[in-house]
Amino acid sequence: MEMTAAPALAHDTAPPPDLPASGPTGAFWTRGLETLCAELKCGSDGLGSAEAVRRLERYGPNSDAGAQGGGALRAVLRRLIEPLALILLAAGLVSVATGDVGGGAIIVAILGLSVGLDTVQEGHATRAAQALRHAVALKAEVRRDNGFVTVPVEQVVPGDILRVRAGDIIPADALVIESAAFTAAEAALTGEPYPVEKRPGLVSSAEPAEAFNALFRGAVARTGEATALVVATGPTTMFGAVASSLAEAQAPSPFQRDLHAFGLVVARLTLGLVVAVLAVRVVLGRPVLDSLLFSVALAVGLTPELLPMVTTVTLSRGALRMAARKVIVKRLAAIHDLGAMTVLCTDKTGTLTSAEIALARSLDPTGRDDARPASLAAVAADLGGDRGSLNAALAHAHPDAGRGWERAGQRAFDYGRRTGSVLARGPEGPLLILKGAPDAVLALCTARRAGGRSEPLGPEGRDEALGQVRILAEEGLRSIAIASRAWTGPLRPLGALDDCDLVFEGFCAFADPPKPTAAAAIARLARAGVRLKILSGDDPVVVRRLAGLVGLRAGTVLSGSEVAGLSDAALAVRVRKVDAFGRLTPDQKARVVRALQSKSAVVGFLGDGINDAPGLAQADIGLSVEGATGVAQAAADMILLASDLEVVADGVDEGRRTFANILKYVRMGASSNFGNMLSMAVASVALPFLPMLPTQILLNNLLYDLSEVGIPFDRVDPTATARPQVWNMAALLRFAGVMGPLSSLFDLLTFGVLLLLCGASAEEFRTAWFLESMATQILVIFVIRTSGRPWQDRPSATLTVSSLAALAAALTLPFSPAGAWFGFQAPSPSALLGIGLITVAYLVAVEMVKPWVMCQQHRSPRPLRA
């Protein structure tokens, strides 16, 4: 096999001690072999064993540093210092201190379960980096002591001479010295779906996808053999940069940020109310111990003890529903983030397209559609035995093309001459069929097909044909040319002189077509308020064509070189108007995601290759697909069992439905707890006795929380899933600020009825108010769970059962023998009648106020506008 070789290197096997601190970085393929060898102080004979050991100590092993983690204990502590977790922990301890050991244990157990589930999800970045390390070769063949030897891949160092063959995984970034029909599959690194020919030479472009003279760690050798100079190893490779980005700590997700903000609000409100009540009661001369116990009971009452459980159950329920829709959830909080998503960035190959090359057109020499070129090419593909991606596409388009033909001779495809030929015997008699690169094939032709005859082919005809190739390229199609010659004389093996005096038959144009469902899914996402952007490592021309086919704005496609020339501020402006990006490096994909996030967009990223991993890690929600690289799956928050945007759209709907149910609990709990505690605070100052005992407050709060355990299974108003949603803290405070005091007004009315009309004792007062509080809190769930009329938008059976069961327990407990344990005393019939009327009046008032107070409950993230 003939090798294509670069200029010879100096035989310097004893480099001086002043080695560079690291191998050459950046676009090393633009510097030339002699320059790189001088920088690395190496020669064409490779390295000696002693020098290799010295370099290994200098540069470190050819592997990636693991993610920096603090272990499970640090992960747990990090979650426990969240405001809401601290409040819940304090609430549990206070419950135990005030005698409610069971309630306190439940609160602490719920908190432990929530923290435990979150901790299990810890370390995705670490696992992603580990997947990167396992994805590369375990052994490498390098030249040491004037001979090639096999060494562990970790021992490859800059300056080594590397040899790779078909099937090998390239272990380091290297510059090609010699090659023989060598191609590498770089789709996972660059997004290029076709195998790329690698050969020696100079490259002026700084784009990795155009570096035909460079081998990249993690790519797979498809054909041939090559030797190359190792330039970079470990973290300094393009592959290693991906691992480093995944090892970095990730920013909190939108759901985590919102939960933190909510915890701070609850903490401030709790502290302010408790301190105020305690101070006023002490100033008024009330017993200090009673005041302290009552104040801490208020703190417990204001705390949404079951929020972690409701959140976890709701998210878990959403995960099960999403699994039915072919989405596997790795991080539960990502369900909310998917519903909040406003921009979806996606790779091209394998996500918008099928990653299966297809025959798009068969053209005669003048550019008119003609089936003959593809038919002849399919005959050559069938008889030649090569099942590369282009030949497979030809065979798929013409499955019976080889029927009636048999091979009499063959010259395999050669990357030096860029053609391959077959001597076939069939219906047209003996026929030489040649296919390959258009310029190489046209140089061998003296005529072209014109209908059923041939005509001379001159320079103008060749220029016209090459112009047709350029037109096809602008449409994102890759072309090969087909030529033939009627064989005369005896059949014999083909030689180099046989590829002459050919008749140009035409072109076969290939494409990686979009999936049939892509355009409809993109339109569906757009209607849901999610804007799609293509972030690809493929050629911008190909990206532009695909964007147009799926309904995106294709007028402007930003290339990786253009992105590199923009500042962060300038890029943040450009990404608002551009929907398609091409020739992006992995770090540039992550940079585009950051630019979108800087404009308050909630960004999702869908990808399946190594080059997508940084974008997946940077995005608020990372989506990968079944069959994607292990790196992409490890970096993702969700994995789609079907690589289809329709599945993403289904997941968005489910995410919004799940969030809507979580928001119901937060809205109900915040308003109810605030109203009750506000009433208690006022009553504790105005009344000569405690309006409710600490144990009664805890029981009230626990029963109310239990009444809402059915929320994860509740139905959701379609208006709540129509647009992206995030927590609107101002709207939540507004809701609590209106509904809480409204509840307190009716509580004060209850106080007046009990004291002035019924003359209730302290025990009767506490019992009657407990009954009124439980009735109004639980029944109002059915009113404020929906923005519509409660009798039109009915709750789920699970929520109905859980709420009514909790209400039944609350209404019967004071009249049971166990009521005395909590200090209850049955109120008079007149008090019970008054409580019933007040409850009905309260529910009517809430239904009247609801349309105004709920009009701004949902807030969509700021849309990305051009």
Image: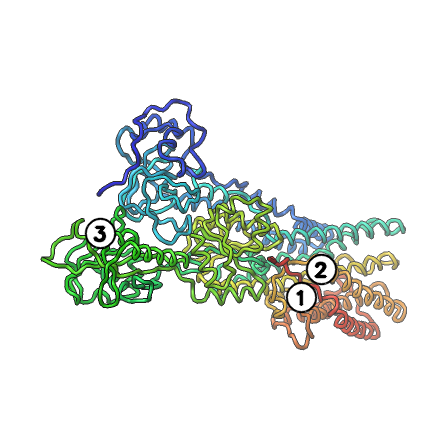
Residue 127, horizontal then vertical, whole percent: 47, 46
Which three-letter amino acid code belongs to the residue tagged 2?
Leu
Residue under label 3, please give it.
412
Judging depth in this view, the residue of 192 and 51 nearest the camera is 192
**Crowding near the residue tagged with mark 1, few <14, some 14–19, many ≥20 C-alpha atoms within 10 Å:** many
Residue under label 1, please give it.
707
Q: Is mark 1 on a helix, strand or loop?
A: helix
Specify which label sits upstream in the sequence, 2 or 3: 3
Judging depth in this view, the residue of 228 and 485 nearest the camera is 485
Q: In this view, does 303 lie to the left or right of 652?
A: right
Which three-letter amino acid code belongs to the residue tagged 1?
Ser
Specify which label sits upstream in the sequence, 1 or 2: 1
Q: In this view, does 715 lie to the left or right of 67?
A: right
Q: Residue at x 42, y 48 (%)?
A: 189
Judging depth in this view, the residue of 759 and 377 nearest the camera is 377
Q: Which residue is drawn at 47% across and 41% down?
A: 241
Q: What element carries label 3?
A: strand
Between tags 1 and 2, which lies in front? 2
On residue 240, the disc is none
Residue under label 2, please give it.
732
